[in-house]
Structure formats: structure tokens, C-alpha cells
Image: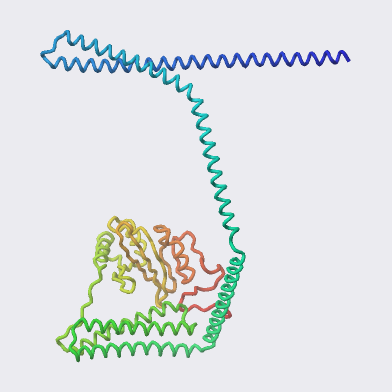
């Protein structure tokens, strides 16, 4: 037992000796660090003093040189005055250097002593600000919770009931509208194709007849009453508006009857344009006939975009030749956009020129679509120049049996998906396209739905 106690005693003594040795080493290390820091600070102070002294000497030398030059330029100065001025300047520079060195030393010492206090003060301020912010957030949350709990239960129930009633009414209206649409579609489907064609023809004929009658009547009234050109213009405008409204109504009726055309919107646009053109021509002819030989038909004003079209054609023909374009015109049915018609073999070259030529610079492709005209197909491209704030349309006519044309995707990335859509719906192949696959229909779809002669592969669809 005594041996075990002696062993424990020895262990404790050894631990204490090791602890004392560790403390001694730590104290020596700290003393060495303190000494090195003091030495480095003294060295920094000495360096600062030396720098200040050098700067002061340089400044003194400059001042002395300036004084000497000033003294030399003045013929009445005395040599003794120069020496005195130099001595004064040197003395002043030395005094200033000593003062700067003292100031640097005092600032260094004060910075070392105040660093700890500044850090403690900053920490205390940050902690106080954090506590204040947390208290404000907690107070705001408490007030919001209290205001939310103060809402009346009856008001909640009333609002819930109103929302439920509105949702039920909306669902009922949607169901009713859907049922009416289905019934209308079913009734339209049961009507025969012959009846639909006859109704279509009658509506168009009635619109044209009414437009011609209105134009004739307005022209006769103008001739009989001897009205001026303004009244003739008003009569024409009214006739055109009436014809347009009638054509729109006929197209709408045809669309509601359903099923006769693959694209009711295009048929409607065509009917409106045809009726409008017919009415305008009839009004001009009748007005000229009623007015006698001395009255002239009103001249059509040129488009404000005609100068742009002339510029495009001039630049293209000057650089690419006269045979790259088939035609050029102002498209009055599309906001008077200048339109260029290129050959299939010059289509890509003209498009490339429109983009990269400095006088044109059409850097944005806004639209690309294809159209089936039964005898041929067309690809129509809208381009815009952000720098010039101008637009142009590029068109190309291609064969319908094998519709193939160069892809514009290498020039404008915006042509990627529109070309895929034209391929999907019309079967137009764009050579050089990186991924010419269907985009709307599945890959195994048979045919192209926007062709005029398209017949569904599955008759039940």
C-alpha cells in the first residue's frame, strides 16, 4: 500500500514539474515576442524619422535652390543675404523634420495604445445595434400577429362563402359555354360541304354587291349635288368601311359554321382584302364616270417607305448585280413594309448582304413563315435594323413539288424554330439547318397539315 502511495506522489510531483516547465517556456516565449515587437516598433519609428528627415532635407534643398534662383535673378541682392537665407531655410527645414519625426512617433504610440479600446468600443456598439434591431423585429412580428388574430371569424366565414359561390358560378358558366360550343360544332359538322360552300359564296357575293351598290350610290349623290373632293373621299371611306364590315361578318359566319377551310383566319383576311379592293375600285370608277370627262380620279399617294425601298434596291443591285432580285414593292397589306423578292439561288446571298452591309445592317429576324399557294410556295422573312430603326421583308418563291431553300439559321439564330415549323406544317426543307425535325407534331405524323391538299391519314381524327 505504501508503495502505491509513493508512486502516486511521484506522478503528481512529475506533473507539477512539467507544468512549471511549460509555464516557464510560455513566459520566455511571450517575453521574446514582446521584445521583438518593441524592436520592430523602434525600427519603424527610426525609418519614419529617417524618411521625414530625408523629405525635409529635399524640401529644404528645393526651397534653398528656389531662393538662390530668385536671389540670382535680382541683381541688387547681396552675397551675405543669400548665405543668411540658406542658413535660415536649412534651420527651418531641420526644425520641421524634427517636429514631423516627433509627431510620427507620438501618433504610432497613441495608435498602439488606443487600438484595443477602439475595438472594444466597436464591438459594444455592434452588439447594441444588433439587440435593438432584434427587439424591433420582435415587436413588429408581435403587432402583426395580434392584428391577424383580431380578424373576425364571421368575416372569414363570409369571405370563404363568397369565394366558394363565385367559383361555383364560374365553373357553371364555363361548363355552359363549353356545352354550347360543342353543340354548335356538332351542328356545323352535320351540315354538308355543299351547303357550306353555297353559303360561303352567297355571303361573299352579297358583300361585293352591297359594296358596289354603296359606292355607286355615293358617287351618284356626289355628282348630282356637285360636292367637292372631300365629300368624295368621305363617300369612298364609308363604302370601304361598309364593305369591310360586311366581309368581316361573312368571314365570321363562315368560321362559325366551321370546317370548310384549314385556316379560317387567312380566308377571312383574304375576303376582307378582296372586298376592300373591289369597293375602292368600284367607287373610283363610278365617281369618275359620274363626274364627267373633266373630273380626274384621285391619285394614290406614294408610300412614306418608298425611299427606303429605293435605297435597298440601289445598294443591293450596285454590289450584287441587277439579276439577284426578281421584284420589289411596298406591301400595303402589311404596314407598307418594303419587300424584296429574291431568286431561290440568290436568296441566302441577299439575306447575308442585308445583315452585314454597313448601309443596311438588318441584325434582327423577327418573323419567318411559309405559305402554300397551290401552284407554288413562298417563304416570307421580316428583318429589322436596330441601328437604322428600319424594317424590310425578304420573300422567295419555290416549287411546290420539291420545296427546298437555304436555311437562314447560320445568319440569324431566330430562324431556327420558325424554319422547323415551316418544315413541320408545310414540308419545306431548309438546307443547312442544324436540326430540321418536327416541332409541333410527333415524328411519325403523316403529311403536312397546312398544305392545301392535305388529307388526314386517320380519317377519324
* Residue situated in front as seen by the camera: 283 or 176: 176
At 45% from the left and 23% from the top, the residue drawn is: 111
User: Where in the figure is residue 374, as x and y percent of width and height?
Assistant: 42, 78
Compared with residue 93, is residue 238 higher up or lower down, i.e. above or below?
A: below
At 20% from the left and 16% from the top, the residue drawn is: 67
* Residue situated in front as seen by the camera: 231 or 412: 231
Viewport quadrant of the N terminus? top right
**243 with respect to 257 (left or right):** left
> Hey, which residue is sitting farthest top in the picture?
80
At 33% from the left and 84% from the top, the residue drawn is: 242
Compared with residue 255, is residue 394 higher up or lower down, i.e. above or below?
A: above
Compared with residue 343, is residue 83 higher up or lower down, i.e. above or below?
A: above
> Hey, which residue is sitting farthest right in the picture?
1
* Residue situated in front as seen by the camera: 252 or 108: 108
Q: How is the image coloured?
A: rainbow
**Numbered marks: total:** 0
User: Where in the figure is residue 363, as x and y percent of width and height?
Assistant: 35, 58
User: Where in the figure is residue 12, as x and y percent of width and height?
Assistant: 77, 16
**226 with respect to 448 (left or right):** left
- The quarter of the picture where residue 335 lies is bottom left
* Residue situated in front as seen by the camera: 396 or 386: 386
User: Where in the figure is residue 444, as x and y percent of width and height?
Assistant: 57, 69
**415 with respect to 328 (left or right):** right
Viewport quadrant of the C terminus? bottom right
- The quarter of the picture where residue 305 lies is bottom left
Amino acid at each position: 500500500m505504501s508503495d502505491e502511495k509513493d508512486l502516486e506522489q511521484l506522478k503528481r510531483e512529475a506533473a507539477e514539474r512539467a507544468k512549471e516547465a511549460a509555464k516557464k517556456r510560455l513566459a520566455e516565449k511571450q517575453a521574446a515576442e514582446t521584445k521583438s515587437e518593441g524592436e520592430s516598433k523602434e525600427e519603424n519609428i527610426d525609418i519614419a524619422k529617417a524618411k521625414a528627415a530625408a523629405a525635409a532635407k529635399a524640401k529644404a534643398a528645393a526651397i534653398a535652390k528656389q531662393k538662390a534662383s530668385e536671389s540670382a535673378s535680382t541683381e541688387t541682392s547681396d552675397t551675405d543675404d543669400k548665405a543668411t537665407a540658406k542658413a535660415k531655410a536649412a534651420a527651418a527645414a531641420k526644425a520641421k523634420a524634427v517636429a514631423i519625426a516627433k509627431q510620427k512617433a507620438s501618433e504610432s504610440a497613441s495608435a498602439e495604445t488606443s487600438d484595443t479600446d477602439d475595438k472594444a468600443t466597436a464591438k459594444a456598439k455592434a452588439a447594441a445595434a444588433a439587440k435593438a434591431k432584434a427587439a424591433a423585429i420582435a415587436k413588429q412580428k408581435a403587432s402583426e400577429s395580434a392584428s391577424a388574430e383580431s380578424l373576425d371569424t364571421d368575416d372569414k366565414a363570409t369571405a370563404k362563402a363568397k369565394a366558394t359561390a363565385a367559383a361555383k358560378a364560374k365553373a357553371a358558366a364555363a361548363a355552359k359555354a363549353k356545352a354550347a360550343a360543342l353543340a354548335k360544332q356538332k351542328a356545323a359538322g352535320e351540315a354538308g360541304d355543299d351547303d357550306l360552300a353555297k353559303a360561303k359564296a352567297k355571303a361573299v357575293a352579297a358583300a361585293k354587291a352591297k359594296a358596289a351598290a354603296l359606292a355607286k350610290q355615293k358617287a351618284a349623290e356626289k355628282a348630282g349635288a356637285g360636292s367637292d373632293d372631300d365629300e368624295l373621299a368621305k363617300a369612298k371611306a364609308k363604302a370601304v368601311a361598309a364593305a369591310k364590315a360586311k366581309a368581316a361578318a361573312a368571314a365570321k359566319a363562315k368560321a362559325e359554321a366551321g370546317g370548310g377551310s384549314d385556316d379560317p383566319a387567312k380566308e377571312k383576311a383574304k375576303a376582307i382584302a378582296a372586298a376592300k379592293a373591289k369597293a375602292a375600285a368600284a367607287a373610283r370608277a363610278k365617281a369618275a364616270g359620274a363626274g364627267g370627262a373633266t373630273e380626274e380620279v384621285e391619285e394614290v399617294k406614294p408610300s412614306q417607305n418608298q425611299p427606303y425601298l429605293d435605297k435597298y434596291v440601289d445598294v443591293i443591285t450596285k454590289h450584287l448585280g441587277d439579276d439577284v432580285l426578281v421584284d420589289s414593292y411596298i406591301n400595303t397589306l402589311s404596314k407598307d413594309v418594303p419587300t424584296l423578292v429574291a431568286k431561290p439561288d440568290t436568296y441566302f446571298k441577299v439575306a447575308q448582304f442585308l445583315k452585314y452591309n454597313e448601309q443596311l445592317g438588318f441584325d434582327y429576324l423577327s418573323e419567318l413563315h411559309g405559305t402554300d399557294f397551290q401552284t407554288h410556295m413562298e417563304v416570307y422573312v421580316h428583318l429589322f435594323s436596330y441601328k437604322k430603326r428600319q424594317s424590310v421583308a425578304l420573300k422567295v418563291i419555290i416549287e411546290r413539288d420539291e420545296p427546298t431553300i437555304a436555311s437562314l439559321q447560320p445568319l440569324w439564330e431566330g430562324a431556327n424554330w420558325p424554319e422547323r415549323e415551316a418544315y413541320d406544317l408545310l414540308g419545306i426543307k431548309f438546307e443547312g439547318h442544324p436540326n430540321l425535325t418536327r416541332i409541333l407534331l410527333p415524328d411519325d405524323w403523316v403529311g403536312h397539315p397546312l398544305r392545301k391538299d392535305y388529307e388526314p391519314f386517320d380519317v377519324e381524327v
